[in-house]
């Protein structure tokens, strides 16, 4: 059953074929959505343009760290005369050296950089794109358990994800007036470029596979299916929520 036919979705955060956002774009396409993909810069442009073409969609650049780039994205959407039924924010960044060792070693500018790109960008995107949201649009972002638990080496990114999840709650109230939903998917660890930047990532994967109720890791397609649900009319009364797609790992205490 096509759950997203007739809907237009903007999917940010594809860097390569391992990106969670790429699995989401493929699933949205399979469910009949029209796609606008965004990429961070020239390095990822050729790959993302190819992916957009495969999905019958379009691609455009958006570096969420500048207001000019967000305004250019808004202009791109305005020019096409479409409204967005779904927005996927799948973007995060922290310096590699701050994803290892002591959290208290985080630098002032590293903290600001991680929170700016990984959390504030959702707020900025919603502000810029609110005028082009369709009634009952669905906004979603990607978070991780490190927001609510101290996960070794995740450090400043855990603090950024806590800010991101709080932003989801505030945005859900602001945008709820217009019938727009805002949710987060808390994905289990998945081998991607961003995840590999976290020191000791492979041992996190092993721990989840051993201890999660389902005795496996979630994969990008599991996250993509949940994203389809959140973008669809099956989730119309769900907002301000963090949906765990992690094979149940978050519920386990001492195992
Ligand atoms: N992989 C995991 O284990 C995991 C688990 C939970 C949550 N997440 C989250 O999922 C999201 C996607 O990450 P991923 O694992 O697919 O890795 P990824 O490296 O494929 O994706 C991260 C994306 O962020 C983009 N990005 C970074 N800075 C940007 C900027 N200034 N402007 C625009 N885009 C920018 C990159 O271009 C890239 O496409 C992130 O928010 C990540 O924290 C990942």
Image: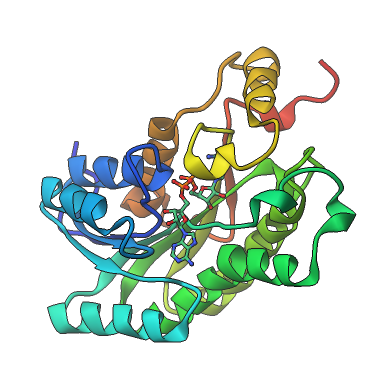
Inspect this view and state whether residue 177 appears: no
Give the residue displayed 65% in from the left and 56% down from the top: 95
Give the residue displayed 56% in from the left and 17% down from the top: 216
**Nearest the eye: 213 or 233:** 213
Give the residue displayed 58% in from the left and 31% down from the top: 246
Q: Left or right of 35: which side holds 231? A: right
Q: For the C terminus, give its image quadrant.
A: top right
Percent across and percent down for residue 102 are 87, 47
The part of the image, by quadrant, that contains residue 20 is top left
Inspect this view and state whether residue 8 appears: yes
Percent across and percent down for residue 52 are 18, 53
Give the residue displayed 43% in from the left and 31% down from the top: 222
Percent across and percent down for residue 233 are 32, 53
Q: Is residue 79 above or below residue 96?
A: below
The part of the image, by quadrant, that contains residue 111 is bottom right
Q: How is this picture coloured?
A: rainbow
The part of the image, by quadrant, that contains residue 11 is bottom left
Q: For the N terminus, give its image quadrant.
A: top left
Percent across and percent down for residue 162 are 71, 58
Q: Left or right of 93: which side holds 28? A: left
Q: Is residue 60 above or below residue 104?
A: below
**Nearest the eye: 91 or 83:** 91
Q: Left or right of 49: which side holds 223? A: right
How many marks are shown on the rendered structure?
A: 0
């Amino acid at each position: 059953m096509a759950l997203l036919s007739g809907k237009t979705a903007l999917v940010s955060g594809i860097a390569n074929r391992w990106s969670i956002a790429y699995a989401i774009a493929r699933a949205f396409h399979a469910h009949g959505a029209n796609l606008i993909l965004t990429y961070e810069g020239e390095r990822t442009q050729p790959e993302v343009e190819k992916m957009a073409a495969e999905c019958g969609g379009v691609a455009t650049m958006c570096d969420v760290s500048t207001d000019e780039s967000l305004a250019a994205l808004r202009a791109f959407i305005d020019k096409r005369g479409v409204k967005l039924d779904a927005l996927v924010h799948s973007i995060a960044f922290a310096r590699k050296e701050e994803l290892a060792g002591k959290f208290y070693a985080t630098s002032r500018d590293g903290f600001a950089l991680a929170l700016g790109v990984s959390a504030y960008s959702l707020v900025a995107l919603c502000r810029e794109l609110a005028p082009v949201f369709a009634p009952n649009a669905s906004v979603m972002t990607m978070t991780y358990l490190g927001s609510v638990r101290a996960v070794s080496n995740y450090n400043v990114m855990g603090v950024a994800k806590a800010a991101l999840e709080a932003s989801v709650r505030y945005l859900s109230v602001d945008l709820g007036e217009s019938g727009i939903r805002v949710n987060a998917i808390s994905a289990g660890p998945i081998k991607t470029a961003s995840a590999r930047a976290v020191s000791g990532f492979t041992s996190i994967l092993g721990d989840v596979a051993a201890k999660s109720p389902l005795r496996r890791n979630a994969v990008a397609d599991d996250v993509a299916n949940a994203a389809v649900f959140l973008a669809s009319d099956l989730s119309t009364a769900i907002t301000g929520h963090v949906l765990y797609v992690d094979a149940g790992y978050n519920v386990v205490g001492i195992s």
